Amino acid sequence: MKVNILKGFADVCPPEITLWHHIEETAKRHFFLYGYEEIRLPIVESTELFYRGIGEGTDIVEKEMYTFADKAGRSLTLRPEGTASAVRCYIENQLYNRPSPQKYYYHGPMFRYERPQRGRQRQFYQIGCEAFGVAHPALDAEMIAMINRILLELGLDNLQIEINSIGCSKCRPNYKSNLIAFFGDRLSSLCSDCNRRYVTNPLRIMDCKVPKCIENTKGAPLIRDYLCSDCSEHYRALKGILEHYPINFIENPKLVRGLDYYTRTIFEITTENLGAQKAVAAGGRYDGLVEQFGGPQTAAVGFAMGMERLVELLKNQSNNTPPKARIFVATLGAEAERASFGISEELRSAGIQVSLNYGHSSLKNQLRKADRLNATHVLIIGEEEVSSGMYNWKDLSNGQQGQSRLQDFINLVR
RNA sequence: GUGGGCGUAGCUCAAUGGCAGAGCGCUGGACUGUGGCUCCAGUUGUUGCGGGUUCGAGCCCCGUCGCCCACCCCA
């Protein structure tokens, strides 16, 4: 019987996998430049970690987690995001004793039980960073600049950087109650989802795309008018740094987040080149989370990029990676076949990728096979070549041919 | 959880209720020491699955499973 992959889960195979490598390599190179070090986190955590970290009322915790009991009856959960684990790791390993800021990155699969659609899987991959120990907005700005550089180097354009501040535990409650008061006598003219949001997360009403709701948010109080002086100053300073550098960004006073732990700066990088799931990276500051988990009071800021969405964007642009030498060794006759094995090994020792013809077939077929394998050069070995040590080669890109000693051929293609 | 669309060859898709096809791919030949282009030949099917209507179903009806897109939510 045939067994199929689960809904919302995907295999990644060649040639697409090279895009994944490219993204991961580019991100890691920049993480190094900005001083981020890797942490490897478990995929399964105690359910309570996400319950307390992400927030009980959030959609992720309420209906999207892969939660199950282990053999001892403990409630475990496949991680739906990385920040909660990173904070747990930070506290558990007392990383706050290292010089601040402590900068870490992680990557790997996340799990959310959602209905799959374009840009959304149940197992999806994120690369993310968390920086601890600095409250100054220069760190927020640096992180946004880093993400911007990574995305630009990947060749992505048509990107928008949106930022907002959602205040802190001092000023947000006040804003929230004003918002509730404002929408309180307008509930009948809001959509059904917004009526639900009114109870669960009133800030989300501001983010609704239903026309009548957008209409109703006109004149609604905006968070930026309710920020306390510290939050206000932090936000102002962040914008100042970004403008001076400069980084193009858009202030979106209605931008919100679905996770409870965010404070002050939040940001989202979106594209018009995807479907409805258009955020390719997002994050923000979470100055209260470390303390909430029993660690020292620690300011922190983090973000994550969605791998599947980046891969989707890269697929749609032309691939201009420079070709590396890939040699196909063609043989004619039993003696050449024996010799080809050692010659191939020698080429590999020189760092060159080699395919060879296993068994024997006509030269025409071998050249055709080389072409299909996307080889750059074919090394042709017959009896004459074996005895003389002068090998026939052909450049498949332009048809050019020549005869060289093996070492000269290696220098030629490398 | 809700709504819409779609399931036919390895892939992309055709086929008034009447012989299940094309293009691409793959294998080989034209060309046995020279690929790509061209030409020729070959190749692949439980039409997702189960039932019903009918002389006859890929097509109509019912059910079911799967995929996609959107809402919701989010990276």
Image (tube, coloured by chain):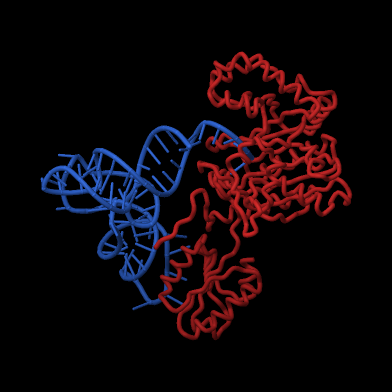
Chain colours: A red, B blue
Residue A317 visible in the snapshot: no
Residue B26 position in % (x across, y down):
39, 64
Q: Quadrant of the N terminus of chain A?
A: bottom left
Residue A334 relative to residue A240: left or right? left
Residue A309 position in % (x across, y down):
58, 44
Q: Residue at x 74, y 42 (%)?
A: A302
Q: Quadrant of residue A326?
A: bottom right
Q: Quadrant of the C terminus of chain A?
A: bottom right
Residue A273 lies, with reference to residue A95, above or below; the image says above
Residue A76 relative to residue A223: left or right? left
Q: Residue at x 67, y 48 (%)?
A: A47
Q: Residue at x 63, y 16 (%)?
A: A184
Residue A353 visible in the snapshot: yes
Residue A270 lies, with reference to residue A6, above or below; the image says above
Residue A202 relative to residue A143: left or right? left
Residue A412 relative to residue A39: left or right? left
Residue A276 lies, with reference to residue A382, above or below; the image says above
Residue A350 position in % (x across, y down):
66, 72
Q: Quadrant of residue A293?
A: top right
Residue B67 position in % (x across, y down):
44, 47
